[in-house]
Image (cartoon, rainbow, N blue to C red):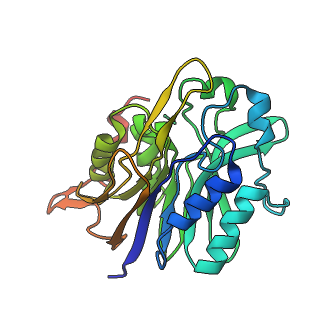
Amino acid sequence: MSTITVAAVQTSPVFGHVEANLAQALALVPAGCDLAVLPELFATGYQFRDRDEVASFAEDLAPGAARGPVLGALAGHAARTGTTLVAGLVERDGARLFNSAVLVRPDGSHGTYRKAHLFLDEKLLFDAGDLPFPVFAACGTTVGLMICFDWVFPESARSLALGGAKVIAHPCNLVLPWCQEAMVTRCLENAVHAVTANRVGSERRTGSKLVFSGGSQVVAPRGERLARLPATGTGAAVARIDPGAPGTQLTARNDVLADRRPELYRG
Ligand code: ACM
């Protein structure tokens, strides 16, 4: 058994106040944890008015490119503390703009995921992700990335589990009420842990007011909530987990991954 400490960090960003949002989020990362997950678009806020505004916050995340302010701050914090960080930010790749997440290791290396399933006005603001759901070796285990609304599509978590993820890092800006419950099932059906980091507060920068639902949580492979925050307020939901346990064998005769029957499934 090899355990690690994971944290879902719940923040209350103010749109456009990147420096203050970064400082708040990094100050909430618990000292000594191995993996901390921050919300989707945690440094910028969520409700962009148009693509030009999205572009003004975008960073080039290509390996070897000069680090932007958000990736730079994450890398600096990871190097100083030894904590692997997962967080959402705006990515630019040429003319394309992605709602992305990075996993940043203490050695300065990082991996990227581009949100596949865009929610509501995100479809007008971002390009849809074009990369497979990634699984990265980090903090002594395997960490898969998905972002917020990806939870609606069971294939997201299943792809990560089939790719070997033991822990799903899940940055969110949740506004619908169902995700925190649904992630219990995602964990059970894939025998994975999930660290869902959501924000709180609200934004009304376009026609509709969005209220973000908090409830950041760490869920274990048999569906137990190991830690959970309320719907309001900032903080960190922290749990000590054994990423490989209890594994995919649900009963003596049932394995949630090995017993799949893909030849019978549509789609
Ligand atoms: C969402 O995907 N931010 C709801």
**Residue furthest bottom as drawn:** 1
Identify which residue, 215 or 138, lies in the foreground.
215
Q: Can residue 172 be seen at all in this image of the molecule?
A: yes
Q: Can residue 109 be seen at all in this image of the molecule?
A: no
Residue drawn at the location 83% of the way across and 63% of the way down: 64
Identify which residue, 68 or 223, lies in the foreground.
68
Tell me: 132 left or right of 229.
right
Q: Quadrant of residue 68?
A: bottom right
Q: Position of residue 177 (x, y in %)?
A: 34, 33
**Residue furthest left as drawn:** 252
**Image quadrant where one finds the C terminus:** top left
Q: Is residue 151 above or below residue 163?
A: above
Q: Position of residue 47 (x, y in %)?
A: 61, 32
**Image quadrant where one finds the N terminus:** bottom left
Identify which residue, 127 or 175, lies in the foreground.
175
Q: Position of residue 57 (x, y in %)?
A: 76, 43
Tell me: 71 left or right of 67.
left
Identify which residue, 194 or 162, lies in the foreground.
194
Residue drawn at the location 60% of the way across and 37% of the way down: 46
Residue drawn at the location 58% of the way across and 64% of the way down: 26
